[in-house]
Amino acid sequence: MGAPDPNGVTGAGDPDGADAVGALVEDVGGEAAEALRALLTHSAVGIAVWDGDLRCVWANDALEGIDGIPRDQRLGRRPREALSGDATELEAVVVQVLETGACATGREYRPPAAEGRPRDRAFSASFVRLDDAEGRTLGVCMVMLVIKDRRWAGNRLAMVSEAGARIGTTLDVMRTAQELADFTVPLLADYVTVDLTEAVRLGEEPLDRFGPSQGSLPKFRRAGRASIHPGAPEALWSEGEVVYVPETSPFMEALSSGRPVLHPTIDTSEGTWLDRDPDRAAKIREFHMHSLLIVPVQARGAILGVAVFVRTDNPTPFDETDQLLAEELVSRAALSLDNARRYTRERTLALALQRSLLPRRLDGGTAMEVAARYLPATPGDSVGGDWYDVIGLPRGRLALVVGDVVGHGIDAAATMGRLRTSIRTLADLDLPPDELLTRLDRTFIRLTEDEVAAGAGVPSMGATCVYAVYDPATSLCTLALAGHPPPAVAHPDGVVHYPDLPHGPPLGVGMLPFPAAEIELPAGTVIALFSDGLVEERHQDIDVGLERVARVLSLGASSLEELCTAVIGTLPSPTPADDVTLLLARGL
């Protein structure tokens, strides 16, 4: 092979090309040779040739338009130096083709963004070995074609797979909608919005169809937005705000038909739907929005909202390929949104059921001052089965109860309600704590057996409970534990301790006793009953939580309500991973 031509056109062995290209053209001959030479030199397809020593010996003008490297700076260099960006993998392909003679096609090449060239473009590079008539290897020819002006265009499966990992990471409908918007900018569009019906946000049942014929339109709220411009200045509405949807518009067309609406070019002339939506029209003109794609968000036969994709800086209009990709991404997001909606509905129902079953007011009578707090788990975790109760007993005594059903959701809340009712019934019999828990254990086992026999939901896996009876006449408190944390006792002098009490098994085990013990609670002493959610953290030893609670109880407060607030305020997070229940009582 000859040295690179200093004029930067071709190799020195041929004024119009390197030996490899010259041999190819010469084999054709005549007018066809001139046509082939023109095709190679002036084609819009990027072409380059490397010789057996991996030196670039020929390149056409189109390749400079792809990666910005002038031809004279490309010649004589190895592939990783002759192509912009990281071309190490492409050089390895050239070596492989040179050695094996096997063609390599569809290798993605993504040149760095630069001024004057469309950003975020992907190209497909194919390589073929060039041999002469005698079979001698002359070099390798690379042909480069543009795929699409967007990321990952050469690997749609990878894109959809990545979407599955990044969209729907929580059971929060608003966050899921935002994840969809974030993922598709600038991957697919320059500006994206996701608007959901109010029913979806609240966890209610969405409508099957939309449109003026179905009566008044549902209320939409902005759930997600993303833009290549900081702050998304294109947006007319922020997250959570009600969005105006014109009855005659491509948005309503997509919602009423359940099919995507593609406008490769946005028509802003007079007489279009934008005449009735001047605010949107102004934004379209201000940010040079030129292409629009609207995809309804629907799952399991119901429409949840609409995703809107817009291109501004990207000059390529949306096409059918973009539409198919957008549909696939939105479809995946829609399933996550519907799962989040269903979870929100179940959580709302479970929380309402649980709160309805908890005592509306606490009355310690003349025996004790009482106060309680219940804090449901973070929205990422279903409502549990915590409960508390204060029950007046004969002879001025008072029963204190805190329990926790294993599991979450409506089933746990319903089981909690049945156990609370059972305890109140057993308390009316004035049973001592150990006997009461024994009977409650039998009741729980029967409830579980009935659930299994009826096939009604998931059977309860167990429950814990602490039952205490305080007698103001003797200042003695008799307690029994069923797999539950022991209470804390805070004396008026600030000393706090956790009494060493015998532990019984959780409810549902059967055949095991629940031994009781007595502790003295002089006037002014506070006893704190709580669920494990108050002191347990996934990444901390339980002793850390017990010490945290004891430290606050030792400080005291002017009222138990204030002390409850102070104890709950020590939680590491305002949205705990498990339900938190706290019941405080102070002898009068």
Image: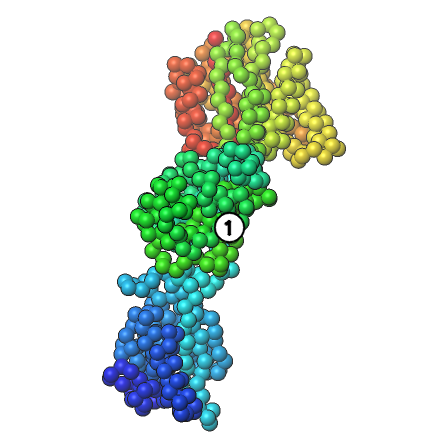
Q: Quadrant of residue 77?
A: bottom left
**Residue 315 percent across, percent down from the top left:** 36, 59
Q: Is residue 47 above or below residue 150?
A: below
Q: Which residue is disc 1 drawn over?
A: 260
Q: Is residue 333 above or below residue 446?
A: below
Task: Mark yes or no: residue 329 visible.
Answer: no
The extreme left residue here reads 6
**Residue at horizontal 49%, vertical 14%?**
370
**Mark 1 belongs to which amino acid?**
Pro
**Residue placed most toward the observer, 332 or 304:** 304
**Residue at horizontal 67%, vertical 29%?**
508
Q: Is residue 376 above or below residue 39?
A: above
**Residue at horizontal 38%, vertical 20%?**
555
**Residue 321 percent across, percent down from the top left:** 49, 60
**Residue 534 percent across, percent down from the top left:** 48, 29
The extreme front residue here reads 271
Q: Quadrant of residue 545?
A: top left
Describe residue 403's horizontal placement relative to residue 439 as left or right: left
